[in-house]
Structure formats: structure tokens, C-alpha cells
Image: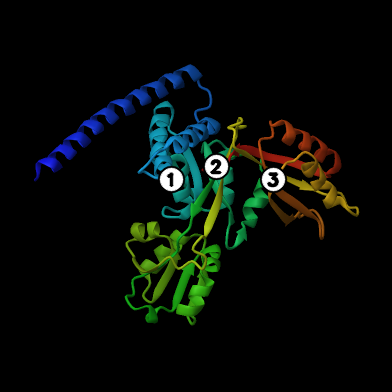
Amino acid sequence: MSEELKNFRAQIDGIDDELLKLFNQRAALAQQIGHAKKGGVVLRPEREAQVLQRLAAANSGPLSAQSVTALFTEVMSHCRALEEPLSVAYLGPHGTFSEAAVFKRFGHACAGVPCASIDEVFRKVESGEANYGVVPVENSTEGAIGRTLDLLLQSPLKVCGEVLLAVHQCLLSQDADMATIKRVYSHPQSLGQCQDWLNTHLPHAERVSVASNAEAASLAAKEKHGAAVAGKQAAERFNIAVLAANIEDDPRNTTRFLVMGNQDVAVSGRDKTSLVMAAPNRPGAVHDLLTPLAKHGVSMSKLESRPARAGLWEYVFFLDVDGHQGDAKVAAALTELKQVAAFVKILGSYPVAI
């Protein structure tokens, strides 16, 4: 080993020793904060968002902003666990993209609670069996997740955050030759995200919808001539080979998840507000719903209609707007909106995903 290499490694060892001291100093302060809260809420999403935004802005490289965010998410996760380990429900089983979203938002020091359905995720949080829940709400290729929207309308839970997860699908199989595959399992959303690729490469294979990509991988691992569309994490968990990677039709394929909880989130400085509303049955009613937003200069980033299930051809509208409901212009727009809408429910204000 050269002297130059020895010197570099000695410098790294010294930095690692200093980092260890600083990590423990931070953890000790987190413990003191926990004692000062005297049983208060452990997770403050607005505070964590401010920390990550500040560090990403101050980053001078060579680490990317994404790497800095991931590193400090883990640091905060392990420090937070010294106050109280958080349990987070998600659509399971292990190995799903929902589980990956949990770890991206909460770090690996949280306790993941896999659930059999999105309904069960909501129930776990509503009953107090889990502190938070993470549910998929929309995909950039396949659109909104209808069941999540329905439950948002019904549930007393509040949206406390969002997670954006780049979704890269793989074809998994125990068969070494793709030509022998007769059946492909996956969640309906994932099949839709890869339909062009499947049409081209496996046009004669039967496509079978299952509850999750992890279940698909589990089935394919046991079945000769079977395959699954799932993520690499599922391949690793079920010890099944990746025959083809990144088979999604859109390389920018992204799923948005919502964090559900029982708390109101304070202003972080870069926020979003989600709400659902219904228009009265009269001409121009939908236009009237949007007028307060335009009047007060509130930008709308999403508008999604959904059958109200209250009557034939009646709809509710899900909106995301820029800003916190505590911001003056958002508050003014919401006040006027409530005067013209037949129904308004504020789902929550929360930091924009980093």
C-alpha cells in the first residue's frame, strides 16, 4: 500500500471518529427534546422538512442533494427512535414499493406494519395500532388510486406528508428463457405501467392481477413458467432472478404516496394542502368552486374527479393547492370556497416532498 493511500485512509478514519461523536451528540439532544415534550407528538413533519431543505440547499457536493437527504433521513430516524420507535402501516407484504416508500420517508429505524389492503392501513392508524400509514394515491402513468381517494373522503385521518418514489419495474422468473414464460403475475397498476413492454416481449403470456407485487414475486418463485412484474427488492426477498430490468413504459414512472396520521402539521415554508369538495347541482357550479382560488392567487397542482357514491352521476373533486391552510391567501380562498361549495373537507396541509 502506498503512503499516499495510507494517508487518505487515516484521514477518513479521523473523520469517521468525529462523525461518530457528532452523531451521538445529536442523539443525546434528541433525547433531551423528547423529555422536554413530556409525552407530546414525536414526529414533527414540518421541522424535519425544514432540516432537509436547509441541508440540501447548503450542500456543496460532491454528494448529491438526494444523497444528503437520504443520509439525514436515516440520522433523524435513529435519533427519533430514541424518543419513541414509530410504527408505520403500509400495503404489504414485505418487498412492495409501499414498504420502500415507508423507509424513504421514515428511515429504517421505524417499525413497518405490512397490511393486506389499503383499507387495513387506514384501520391500523385509526385504531392506534400504528402511528402512521403510507398509502399510494396516484401514479404518473396509471393515474389515481381510486380506493385511496374513497377512504380519504370517509376517514377522520389527516394527510401529514407525501412521498414520491421512482418506480422501476422488473420481470422476475425462475425460468432462464423468457420464451418459456406462460403466465405473468402483478398488481393491476404495475401491469398497466408495463403493458407496452409486455405486449412486445410476452404477447402470448397470460396476465394475472394479484393484490401486490410482493405476492406476485412469491407466486412466480414457486411456479415453473411463471413470472412477476415487481421491483428489485421483491426479487431479493423471494430469491428470484431478474430477467429484465426497468421494463416500465415510461422511464420517469413515479408513484406518489400519502402519509396518514392523527395530527395537524404546522407550516414548514414549502407546503401543500389537499382537500375534497362537491359542487351544488346548478349551472356553472364547478367554475364557481375554482374562482376563490384564482381570486386569491392560490395555485392548484391537481384536480381529480371521483364518483360520490351518493347518487347517479354525482361527483366529488380532489384538489391539491400550493401553500398551507394557515397561509393568509390559502385561508381566505378556503373561507370563500366553503360558502359556494356543497361540501368541503380539508384533508391536510403538509410539507412538499423533497
**For residue 304, above or below residue 297:** below
First along the sequence among labels 2 and 1: 1
- Element on which disc 3 rests: helix
The type of residue carrying mark 3 is: Gln
Taking the spot 34% from the left edge, 23% from the top edge, the residue there is 25
Residue 38 visible (yes or no): no
**For residue 58, above or below residue 98:** above
Q: Quadrant of residue 238?
A: bottom left
Discs 2/1, front: 1
Q: Residues within 10 Å of mark 1 (few under 14, many from 20)?
A: few
- Element on which disc 2 rests: helix
Residue in the foreground of this view, choosing between 59 and 146: 59
Label number found at residue 124: 2
Label number found at residue 66: 1
**For residue 1, above or below residue 224:** above
Residue 127 visible (yes or no): yes
**For residue 199, above or below residue 50:** below
Q: Residue furthest right?
A: 282
The type of residue carrying mark 2 is: Lys
